[in-house]
Image (cartoon, rainbow, N blue to C red):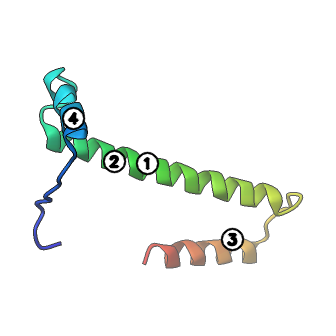
Amino acid sequence: MDDPALQLELPDSLRRFVDERVQRGDYADAAEYLRDLVRRDREAQAAQRLRELIQEGLASGPPRALGESDWSDLRARAVQATR
């Protein structure tokens, strides 16, 4: 991202809504409001992914004890996921 600025056109009704939120003092300006929306969306996406992973785990069958090779595999996968 070379330019941190983002230009955004909103229909009048949405612009009035944003302006109302700012005028009520909920946000300092429209940019703060939009940053908050993006953060909340990112958090919602992370929460959805966590729900999916939990569901996947529940559907994977009965629990079993993990051995050292299982833990090694999990550590390797975690390291790979961060790259």
* Residue at x 32% of width, y 44% of height: 37
Q: Which residue is mark 3?
A: 71
Q: Nearer the viewer, mark 4 or mark 2?
A: 4
Q: Which residue is mark 2?
A: 39
Amino acid type, label 1: Glu
Q: Earlier in the sequence, mark 4 or mark 2?
A: 4
Viewer-proximal residue among 1 and 11:
11
Task: Say which quarter of the image contains residue 29.
Answer: top left
CA separation, marks 3 and 4? 49 Å
Which residue is at the far front?
Answer: 12
Which residue is at the far right?
Answer: 62
Amino acid type, label 3: Trp
* Residue at x 17% of width, y 55% of height: 8
Q: Nearer the viewer, mark 1 or mark 3?
A: 1
Contact between marks 1 and 2 (CB within 8 A): the answer is yes
Find residue 6 and report its horizontal and vertical position in percent: 15, 59
Q: Which residue is mark 4?
A: 18
Q: Nearer the viewer, mark 3 or mark 4?
A: 4
